Image (tube, rainbow, N blue to C red):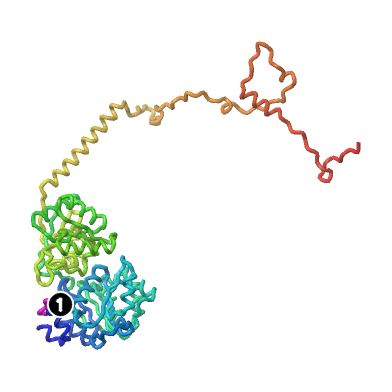
Amino acid sequence: MSFDSFGLHPDLMRAIAEVGYTTPTPIQAQAIPVIVGGGDVMGAAQTGTGKTAAFTLPILQRLMPHANTSASPARHPVRALMLAPTRELADQIAQNVGQYAKYVPLRSTVVFGGVDMNPQTAALRSGVEILIATPGRLLDHVQQKTVSLGSVSVLVLDEADRMLDMGFLPDLQRIVNLLPKARQSLLFSATFSPEIRKLAKTFLNDTPTVIEVAARNATAENVTQIVYTVDRAEAKRAAVAHLVKSLGLKQVIVFTNTKIGASRLARELQREGIPADAIHGDKSQGERLATLEKFKKGEVEVMVATDVAARGLDIAELPAVINYDLPYAPEDYVHRIGRTGRAGASGTAMSLMTPEDQRLLTDIEKLVKKTIVREALVVSGSSNRGERSGSGGERRGERRSDTRGDRGWKEPERSSSRASPYATLATPKSAVPADPIFSQPYQSKAVPSEESSAAPSPGTTTASPRASVRAGLSSIRRAPKSVPAILGGKPKSST
């Protein structure tokens, strides 16, 4: 079978020839006729088998009657909406749509978060027939009233299992409510769990055509999978550097489970002299796209990434991927290793595992229905570093003990009566004498008489200044104030 058998427009066939497609993949051969006929499709295929072309080419064919070169935005309403879970995947789809529609007068654009909205708003207001978007940024434009979805006739959910995850479901429901009910819905992904398959049917108008060109959640046969066991997690960084150098890998993606772990590993590899960079959600969209572009050009040999880069990215002839951390969700393993071995090429998927990761590997093998080969990886010098670190800790402990002895510090002696350990700690005496005014009880003093206020006789002790002040304050007496008679006071005498 060839693409000529689909009856596609000559301008589309011209673009297909330039891309280099000659024979359709199994998912393309089964999905394109159904989509051209207007039916809903739920397609599952291995990653790297051409799912993007499987839905883009027939959508372009269906929109050909609306193609025009008019400058009026009203002649270019949004007719096809393609949703993707990540910014990188949305940008990748937009690039593919641009390739396939190169000679077709149909406009397309992509909107996603992390970048300025103004250029996206300008593109939307100029009119586009095909809109590729992430859910969050699309809702932002809907709220700003810069896009109308009332003319959408085709809805595409790429990587539908992640799109229909609980985190995306509320936004997705809001978007679907804005679309016309009379539409064509297409769902494509590499994995479909039974729960996701059941939930996806609620977003399809008709009974969908289910297309599965391989066993569910299967991995590509041309990808060699191997698991290297290491004794502890700290040895993984040295293991990655060892694999990259010993195998001579000039282009490899290393997957981690955390963003901080990705940045840390990239810095460690740079110290080893390996051109590496990280890509994860904490970086701006400009930084992520710049890193991805350097990786494609070969300026960066190792791209350390979280699962944000695991879906939909098409790196030509990527020879290998490394799972620094085994994914918590077994489905993500299928998407990760699907970055290599694309379009019929061979690839290698290596994973690092500690004894604590056994449960994660068991879940992965249960999903892919395959036992993955295990090999012990011994990196020269990694264990010695651990031993030196341990011995250094002991020496540091010894030095701390010796230092305490030099300072004369002793552990408090304990009496046989189990006295408090703080009993031997004496409270230091203050060098300043205590003021007796704070220790003696209060005593009222009588008003001094004239004799007492006279000068002291010879031989008597003069009172301290503080006592004199107290005596003077106590001698002050205020004269009683008269109270008016109306308030109960004594009336003033007439004399």
What residue appears at the point 16 percent right and 44 percent down from the top-left corner?
Answer: 385
Q: Is residue 20 above or below residue 323?
A: below
Say above or below: 220 vs 255.
Answer: below
Quadrant of the drawing holding the C terminus: top right
Residue 23 among magenta residues: yes
**Would residue 266 be found to the left or right of residue 476 on screen?**
left
Position of 418 relative to 360 (above/below): above
Quadrant where the N terminus is found in the figure = bottom left
Residue position marked by numbered label 1 in the rendering: 213
* Residue 231 at least partly seen: no
Identify which residue, 32 or 69, lies in the foreground: 69
Region rendered in magenta: 18-27
Residue 320 at x, y percent in the picture: 12, 62
* Residue at image location 53% in from the left, 25% down from the top: 434
User: As drawn, which residue projects farthest toward the front?
Assistant: 71
| Residue 38: percent from left, percent from top | 24, 86
The picture quadrant where one finds residue 76 is bottom left
Horizontal placement of 290 versus 380: left or right?
Answer: right
Of the pair 169 and 7, the residue shown nearer to us: 7
Q: Main secondary structure of the magenta part?
A: loop
Q: Amino acid at mark 1?
A: Val
Was residue 20 drawn as part of the magenta stretch in this picture? yes
- Left or right of residue 414, residue 306 in this image: left
Instruction: Tell me where residue 301 sits by quadrant.
Output: bottom left
| Residue located 30% across and 70% down the image | 112
